[in-house]
Every structure is written in C-alpha cells, then in structure tokens.
Image: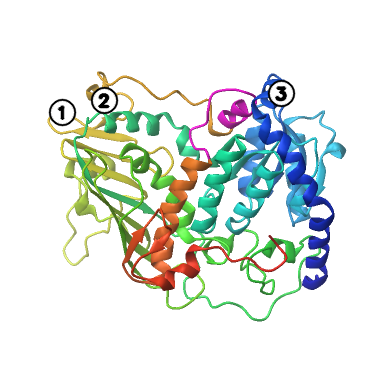
Amino acid sequence: MIDPIQTSLNHDAFSRRQFIGLTTLATGAMAFPSILRAENAGTKLKVGVIGCGGMGTGRLREALGCGCQIVALCDPDSNMMDAAKKEIAKHDAKANLADVKTYDDYRKLLADKNIEAVIVATPDHWHAPIAKAALLAGKHVFCEKPLTHAISEARELRELSKKVKLITQMGNQGSASNNLRRAVELIQAGVIGEVREVHCRAGGVGCHPGLALPTVGDPVPANLNWDEWVGPAPFRPYKQGYYHTWNWRGWLDFGSGPMGDFGCHNLNLPFRALKLDYPTSIDVDAQLMGLPTYPKDARIRYEFAQRGNLPPVTLTWYDGGRPLPEELFPKELVEHLLGKDEPAKPGEKPKRRSMGDGVLILGSKGYTWGGCWNGADYIMVHGEDKISGILNHKASESVPHSLPVSPGHVKEWVLACQGGAPVYSDFDTGGHLTEIALAGVVAARVGKKLEWDGPAMKAKNAPEADQYIVAKYRPGWV
C-alpha cells in the first residue's frame, strides 16, 4: 500500500520548490489576459485535463471536437489516463500520444507553461483546490459541477475569478440549451405570470444509505495513487467498490449526493429565470441516520424573499425515493406525459406513476415543465388550446430573443478563451448557484430548518452548521 506520510511529504516538497513560481507566472497572465487571448485567437487552445474518468473523458472529447489540442492529462489512476489517451487517438489517428504528458499530481501539470487552459473533472472535493491553483497559475478553467464541495470554497472562487479576469465556466451543460435560454426569456417576460412555487426532483445517483465508513481496507491497485485521490479529504483506507471510480458521490467527504450532483442542473432555470438570490430559510425532511453518506431520500424546501417586483418563491426539492407528487401537476400535463390513468382492476392496487426527474415552475398564468438538463421542455399558458414545446408555443411569438444561441457549453468556453463572446455560466454565476445548492446539503446534514444568511454564509439559528459550510483540508494538501 502507498505510504501516505511519504506521499504527502513528496507533495509538499513540490509545493515548496515550484508552486511559488506558478503564482509569479500568474501575475503576468492576470495583468494582460485580453492580450494573451488575442494572440491565441485562431490557434488551437492547448488544454490539460485533470480528472480522466467519465466526465473528464466526455469533456476531453468535446474539447477535441472544438479543435483544442490536449497536451497533458492528470489523474491518480493511470488506467484512466490510458483510456483518455485512446480517446485522443480515436479523434485524431495522427496524434502523437507520446507528446501528451501524464501526471498524478495536478501541480506538476499546472507548472507546464505550454498549457493555456485546464478542464477539471475530478471528484467534488478536489474541484476548489485545483481550480484555485489553476487560476493562480494563469490558466483558463472549465470545472465540472458543483463548482466546489463547500460553500466557503464557492465564495472564494467567485471572488478570485473576478480578480484574475481569466475565462471560467462551470460544467452545468444545460446552460447551453436553447430550451433553457428561451424559457428564461419567456418567464421573465411574464408569459406564465407571477411565479411563487417551484418543484424540482433528481434521483439518488451514487448514494449509499445505511453504509458505515469502512475501517479495514483492501490492497490498493497498482494503477492507483490512493493518497493523491483522497487528497484534502479525511484519509481512510482504500475499499474496493466503495469510492473509486464512481461511488464517491454519495459519501459526504467526497461528494454531496443528488442535491450536490444535480442541484446545479435542476436549480439552474429557476435561479436564472426568477432572479433568485440567497434563500432566507431552508427546511429539510431527511434521515441522515448519523452516517457519512447522503440520506436515502430528502425533501428540501427553500424560501426566497421578494426581489424587486418579483414575488416570494417557495422552491421544493425531492430526491432519492421521494417522487414529485402527481397532485402538483395540472391534469392535462400528466395525461400529456403519462397518458390517462387506467383504473385498477378489482383486487389490485393502483399502479404508482412517476413524473420522473425535472423542474416544474408554476405561474399564475401557466407553467413550464422540463428535465434536468434542458431546463424546460413544455409550456402551457392558461386559455391556450394545448401544451406545446418551449420553443414553438404561440404565446412566445411576441417575446424577443435576448440571449445568444450557444455553440455548445465547452465550445462557448473555448471560443471565449480565444477572445470570443462571454460564457453563460462563469464562476461567479456558477458559484452563486453552487452556494444555493450546497446550502440545501448543509440543511440535510444538520437535520433542521435553517435561518439562512447567504452573504455571511451563516445559519443564524444553527452554529453547528459552520463545520459543513467552511472547508477543512487534510494538512499538507492545499
């Protein structure tokens, strides 16, 4: 097994010798970002990918499709880097894979002056330390959602991103959807009237309710630097199938369950369309059972105050085994999506029907409904003859288009790095959304209603929440 003490010493040694140089290099990049982007316009953006699992490989493919050159890979699992190299070869048979550098320590990658931008697709607990270091090293950053693992980290990245003036994008891909952007325009134009009620649902991706933290580990595979994988999180033994490669999402030291995993998707449309700021309170119905995993299901209710002439909003989140109650939905929408409910046969129970995952925004004149990614698939305006797709409902004909059509979430970022138009989900916007989503996770961990002071990052009635708001790192890792 890898010696965590020796590995940590090597990690710190790199920091002392070389990381000061990164911040020196960053000074020039922060002072002249527009000049650097102008020089690079029309050339291939040189990108390093940090985290080469499923999301990292997916973003790598998209970056290659946008004409980027992948010059370096970083992952504590060498098998994942090998698989990522194969993806590069699939896209470009002439690519010289020997020129693609590989690292198991992200700081060595960031020291490479040839790299202009990085994609961060690690487990959540590594997002903030790597994204921060990349910005300080003068690199443009695309970071998967949620932007950070702790609320304090999101605030720090928001503030840092505004200082360095590099191009940042959080990976909530629905932001590039024409459906989401059009829904924002229609809702803000008042097509569905005043909105006071929103309901969101996401499934129980990667949760492990009832599991205790293993105390006895398994042998660490030869391809995996386990100490590097754990990084700033509390150390624990490697356990086959418990964390790496996918199951880390439900463990609260590494991920944030469905709320953290999908909150930045499902909350995206109401956050933008309704101009939501911080909630004033967060109430929760969840059973954590004192274990280190996200609960098997949760209902989290946010209250948002009036914003200018926009009325207060109650937003309710459901996940795991909590379905969206069918009675919330207008009858015509249920029948449109699920068909008419057939009565149960004698002696049989009625079949339980589910509306699935998505976002229901209820207005005084109508409503929108859509999935996790696209924001809104359907719109209904009271008095109209039928439900219609968000892009072609006749009530929208008089509403002008104000938001640009996206070329794609990754391509939008690539073009911005080369001097193009601004992105739609930069670290300030994405970080604010992440703060709201993670506040719900904090409420689930505390297990009671929180009176929330968003600007101060405080639960006014629950000082015990502080331990989940402010990031704590294992010594020697950040």
What amino acid is labelled 1 in the image?
Glu
Q: Classify residue 281 as left or right of residue 429.
A: left
Dot 1: element: loop
Query: How many neighbours does mark 3 have within 10 angstroms: few (below 14), some (14-19), or many (20 or more)?
Result: some
In which quadrant of the rendered view does residue 285 lie? bottom left
Residue beneath disc 2: 393
Q: Of the numbered discs in the image, which one, if any, rests on residue 40?
A: 3
- At 38% from the left and 47% from the top, the residue drawn is 267
Is mark 1 in CB contact (under 8 Å) with mark 2? yes
- Residue 203 percent coordinates (x, y): 42, 56
Q: Position of residue 379 (x, y in %)?
A: 26, 34
Q: Is residue 265 above or below residue 181?
A: below
Q: Which numbered marker is on residue 384?
A: 1
Q: CA distance from mark 3 to mark 2?
A: 42 Å
As for residue 467 lying within the magenta part, the answer is no
The spot of residue 290 in percent (x, y) is 45, 78
Judged from the image, the secondary structure of the residue bearing numbered disc 3 is helix
Q: Is residue 115 left or right of residue 398?
A: right
Furthest residue toward right: 98
- Find the magenta span and give its range: 411-426
Residue 343 lies in what quarter of the image? Answer: bottom left
Q: Is residue 31 above or below residue 107?
A: above
Q: Which numbered disc, 3 or 1, marks the residue that appears first in the sequence?
A: 3
